[in-house]
Image (cartoon, helix red, strand yellow):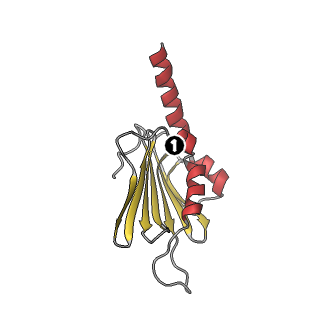
C-alpha cells in the first residue's frame, strides 16, 4: 500500500510539473509562432518574453511541455556580437515554468556543476523530474546565459541529451 501511494505521488508530481500551452499563454500572452497537430493542439510554439528572450516549447502527446528552450533574441540594429540573457531573469523564468519545489530531488551521484572551456561553458542541474542545461559565457564572477534548455523527464517525452 505504501509503495502504491509513493508511485501515485511520483506520477502526480511529474505530471503537474510541465506546463501546458494554456498555462504558458496565461503567463506570457499569445505565442509568436505555433505549429499545430492534426487534432488542433500545439506541437510547438514560441513566446517572446522580453525584447531579448525567446521561449520555444515542444509538447508531448499529453499536451504538456517536454522541452523548453530559452534563447537570447536576435541583436537589434544598434547591437553587435553575441546576445546574452541575465542569469537573474532566467532564474525567475525557470521558477515560473519548472518550480524548484516540483523538480524533485537531485541525485547524490554528483550530477550537476559548471564546466568552462575558455569563455564558453555549461552549467547543468539534474533533478528527478527535470534536467536543466545552461549554456553560459564564462567570466569572472558573472555567468550570463546564452541558452537554457529544460527537459522534462516523462514517458511521452524524447530522451534528453546531456
Q: Residue at x 45, y 56 (%)?
A: 149
| Residue pointed to by mark 1 | 63
> In the visual, does 68 lie left or right of 97?
left
Q: Residue at x 48, y 29 (%)?
A: 10
Q: Where residue 47 sits: x, y (%)?
A: 57, 61
User: Does 77 appear above or below 59?
Assistant: below
In the figure, residue 102 lies in which quadrant?
A: top right
In the figure, residue 130 lies in which quadrant?
A: top left
* Nearer to us in this view, 68 or 143: 143
Q: Residue at x 35, y 45 (%)?
A: 159
User: Does 2 appear above or below 148?
Assistant: above
| Residue 59 visible in the current orientation | yes
Q: Where residue 16 sits: x, y (%)?
A: 55, 37
Q: Residue most toward the top?
A: 1
Q: Where residue 83 sits: x, y (%)?
A: 49, 75
Helix, strand or loop at disc 1? loop
| Residue 47 visible in the current orientation | no
Q: Where residue 34 sits: x, y (%)?
A: 53, 58
User: Does 16 appear above or below 36?
Assistant: above
Amino acid at each position: 500500500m505504501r509503495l502504491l501511494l509513493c508511485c501515485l505521488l511520483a506520477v502526480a508530481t511529474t505530471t503537474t510539473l510541465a506546463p501546458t500551452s494554456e498555462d504558458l499563454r496565461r503567463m506570457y500572452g499569445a505565442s509568436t509562432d505555433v505549429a499545430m497537430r492534426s487534432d488542433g493542439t500545439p506541437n510547438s510554439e514560441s513566446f517572446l518574453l522580453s525584447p531579448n528572450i525567446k521561449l520555444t516549447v515542444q509538447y508531448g502527446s499529453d499536451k504538456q511541455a517536454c522541452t523548453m528552450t530559452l534563447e537570447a533574441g536576435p541583436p537589434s540594429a544598434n547591437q553587435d556580437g553575441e546576445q546574452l540573457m541575465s542569469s537573474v531573469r532566467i532564474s525567475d523564468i525557470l521558477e515560473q515554468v519548472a518550480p524548484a519545489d516540483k523538480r524533485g530531488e537531485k541525485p547524490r551521484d554528483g550530477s550537476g556543476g559548471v564546466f568552462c572551456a575558455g569563455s564558453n561553458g555549461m552549467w547543468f542541474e539534474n533533478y528527478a523530474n527535470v534536467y536543466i542545461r545552461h549554456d553560459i559565457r564564462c567570466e569572472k564572477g558573472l555567468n550570463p546565459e546564452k541558452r537554457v534548455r529544460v527537459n522534462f523527464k516523462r514517458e511521452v517525452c524524447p530522451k534528453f541529451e546531456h
